[in-house]
Structure formats: structure tokens, C-alpha cells
Image (cartoon, rainbow, N blue to C red):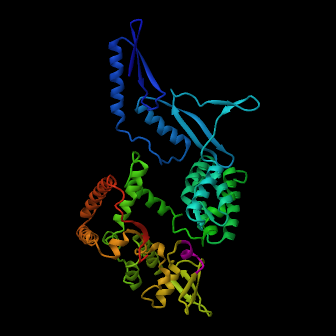
Amino acid sequence: MTSVPSKNIWIRRQQCPCGDWKCYVTYEGDAEETSVASELVKTESVQSEAMVAPYVGMVFKTDEEAFEYYGNFARKNGFSIRKERSRLSPQLGVYKRDFVCYRSGFAPMRKKPTGEHHRDRKSDETPRSFAWALQTFIRFMKGRCPQTILTDLDPGLRDAIRSELLNTKHVTPIWHILPKVSSWFPLQLGSQYAEFKSEFDALYHLESTEDFELRWNQMVSIFGLGSDKHIALLYSLRTSWVLSYVRGFFLARMATTSYSKSVDAFLKGIFSAQTCLRRFFEQVGVAASTQNQPHQEMQYMHMKTCLPIEEHSRQILTPFAFNVLQHELIVSMQYAASEMANGSYLVRHFRKVDGESLVIWIPEDEQIHCSCKEFESSGILCRHALRVFIDKNYFQLPEKYFVSRWRRDSSLVFYDDHSIHDNDDEWFQEFQSLTETLFTESSLTKERSDYVRRELTKELTRLLNEVRDMPESDGAPMDFTLSPTG
């Protein structure tokens, strides 16, 4: 804070509570008045501490909701905001908007060749920059392109993927689509929106593309959306988000809403808005190492059926994959399998007249293929295939149906060739024994488990920081190598 005397009037300048170094608040008056103003600012600052500050990753359904939130936050912290620049796409409408302190200066203007002024809307997120990022990623992967890639609806990124990843399936998860639907159509459809949303959800889950095309046209006609630009956009992108169009491409269940929620919960548990990038990756590594411990995993993998297939799978799969397979096993009990003359099966739910799935069984190679293509999409067998395995009295699933993605013994580990293979050091075995005992004791109650997870994360982070302060090399090379069991 600076004070400048001017004709017996004190002018005080204090940085604006918004935090922008270019913004400041000016107070004029005698010493007593200035003191009161200063105390007022302090009081407002104390009161504002109760409200959670905005953080990167916050999601709002509409522009208005975001503006209202930031407006309330600003008022509680002693300043006001206004809308500044925005970005507009013919397909998406306004897809980015900047809110700034009302004291902040305006964005610089520049002249067009014609002499007109317009706002500078340059951004790092352009098709060119996206293309460079994808090219760099491919070089890092030694020329190998991914089978599938999941993104949001960003048009620049979509164009870059089309040009750089020609043989990669581009998928937009439904959890990127639904917020758009919730912001685009409620106001337009009014009381019809609930019915529209129900039909939209049903369309997403249809198994055949032919059924989707037919019912989509019917939905557009019923709700009078033939000229709506958002409906046109969703339809033009249907091959990237509709289930019947992406079924069969390997997605590892990452396009499901349950995956989105689990990742969100995981990330919120290990970092906050104040976490720097380096600490973020450290916390992810520590949390992943902690959760990958066998005893830590097994305590949350409870048996729910008496099927030998379940017990066998529990010893092999990660908790996430086991829970999915376990659910499919339980639901498979509600299905009946009818064998056909060619050895294939029609599997149907006991309450549904239509919607059966065709399961092709090849006994010579123990191969099974279902028309729902769940295994091809997620790497986990579906309820229809499991129904056939159960009917054929399988006690264990063939090894080929435990893909490496979901096996607990396929993790990437860090080890030293000299100490592991030559057994020169015993600290690794001692640490492993101590860790095993710790997780055995902590798995007895949830209170113990929560305590160990919390304290162990803090201690490992502290040790990691201390180790980083030590010399980086003592002559013994260390390598990142796949575990012999991976």
C-alpha cells in the first residue's frame, strides 16, 4: 500500500482483492477515514475466507451459472467482475468466455487491413498447435499411433486428429455430450425437455446403427428440431459418441460415466487447486503404488456369488475389472441361453421378448464372440458370454480372456538389475516384508486402512523430497523395465 499527500488529502492505493497486479483500489480522505476504509477491507477479506476459491477444472452447465458463481465470489472478496472476450464457433456457439475484474484494463485492439478494430482472439489451442502436439506424441511413441483416442468436442482438436491420426478411432465420451445437451435444449424445449432427454438416452444405448438412424429422425421430427444447429452438430458427430457406432473399438470402459466419476473422485483425493504440476505427478505415483498393494486391493474385492469363475477371477483381475466382471456374472443369472443347430447360442433376458444377443462358441480354441462386442470394447467379458461359460460348466475362464490391461500382475515396476537379480542388497526384501505386514494389519478395519493410506502418503512424499535432495548418481545404473510377470 502506498500513500501520497495531496492538499491535506491522503490518497491511498491498495492492490485490488482480485489479485491482478494491474488493479488497485484508491481511497481518498484524512487519516481517520483512510483507517476506517482499511479496516473495512480487512473485514471483507476475513469474511471471504469462508467461500471456496475457484480452481482449475470447475464445471458449469451454462455461461450464466459460471458468471453468477464468479460474481458471488467477487462480491464476497471485495471486487466485481465483468464479461470480457469470448470465443464463438458456428457449431458449438460460445465455447469459451473470459471473466475479468471490472477494474482491469480492456483487451488490446488491433486494426484489420481495412482499418477496422476487433478483439484479438488468438489462442494456443489452434488446429496447428494441436497437430504439433499429436506429432510430438507419435514421435514419443516411436511412430505407434493409438487405436482409439478420447477427447471433448473441441473443433480444432477434432480437425487435428483427422489430419494426424488417420487410422485412429476418435471417440467423444458421453460424459462430454450430456452437459452440452443439458445446456442447449432445456430452454428451447421447456416442459418437453424431460421427454426429449429420456428419448436421447434411449437412442444412445441402441445396439444397431440402423435403429439409431430411424429413431433419431423420428425424435427430431417429434420435437421440431429439424433446423436446430446443435442437433445438426450432434448428428454430424454421431460416429464418435453414439454407442452403436463406437462398439467394438477398444475403450477400456473410459467412455462410461462411472469411469468419469471414479477418476474425478480419485483426483480430488490426492490434490487441490494449490497443487503444482510436479507435486501432482508425485501424488499420483504414490497413490497408485499404495492402491496396487495386493492386500490393499483384496480387502475391497468381496465375493457375491458361489461361482468358481468369480473366485478364480478375483485372484487375477484388478479391483476395477473384477467389480465389472462380478456385476456381469450376477446379471447373467437373469439370462437364458438357447443352443442353435450350428453350436451358437441366443442369449435373452427372462423378461424381454426381443433384444437377444448372438454368442458364437468355437470349442476347439475355446473362443467366444458376442454380438454386443463388450469384450472387444472393454476387455472384460459380457453377461451373455459368461452365461454360456456357466452353462458349459466352466470353473475358470480361459487365460486369453484376462487381458494384460486388467491383470494385477502386469504393472510397470522400478527395479535395479544389480540389486534384484544378484541379491546384493537385502533392503528390498526387508521393505517388502514390512509393507506386507503393514497392509495385513491395516486391512482388518476401515479405520486402520484409512489411517495408513493417509499417513503413508504423507511419509512417502516426505521421503521422496529428501531423496531428491541427495546426489542423483553413484555409478549404479537404474532402469525402468517391465516386471518379469508383466
**Image quadrant in which you'd find residue 162:** bottom right
**Image quadrant in which you'd find residue 323:** bottom left
Above or below, comparing residue 1 to residue 358 in the picture: above
At 52% from the left and 28% from the top, the residue drawn is: 104
Position of 247 with respect to 394 (left or right) is: right
Above or below, comparing residue 394 to residue 202 in the picture: below
Q: Residue furthest front?
A: 475
At 55% from the left and 93% from the top, the residue drawn is: 364
Percent from the top left, x then y, of residue 447? Answer: 24, 62
Above or below, comparing residue 46 to residue 479 in the picture: above
Position of 447 with respect to 90 (left or right) is: left
Position of 51 with respect to 338 (left or right) is: left
Residue 16 drawn in magenta: no
Residue 193 appearing in the image: yes
Percent from the top left, x then y, of residue 253? Answer: 51, 67
Observer-nearest of 483 and 163: 483
Residue 198 appearing in the image: no
Q: Is the C terminus in the top left, top right, bottom left or bottom right quadrant?
A: bottom left
Above or below, comparing residue 160 to residue 371 in the picture: above
Percent from the top left, x then y, of residue 370? Answer: 57, 80
Residue 375 drawn in magenta: yes
Observer-nearest of 438 and 398: 438
Observer-nearest of 291 and 187: 291
Region rendered in magenta: 370-377
At 55% from the left and 90% from the top, the residue drawn is: 365
Q: Residue furthest top?
A: 7
Q: Is the N terminus in the top left, top right, bottom left or bottom right quadrant?
A: top left
**Image quadrant in which you'd find residue 412:** bottom left
Position of 254 with respect to 167 (left or right) is: left
At 63% from the left and 65% from the top, the residue drawn is: 168
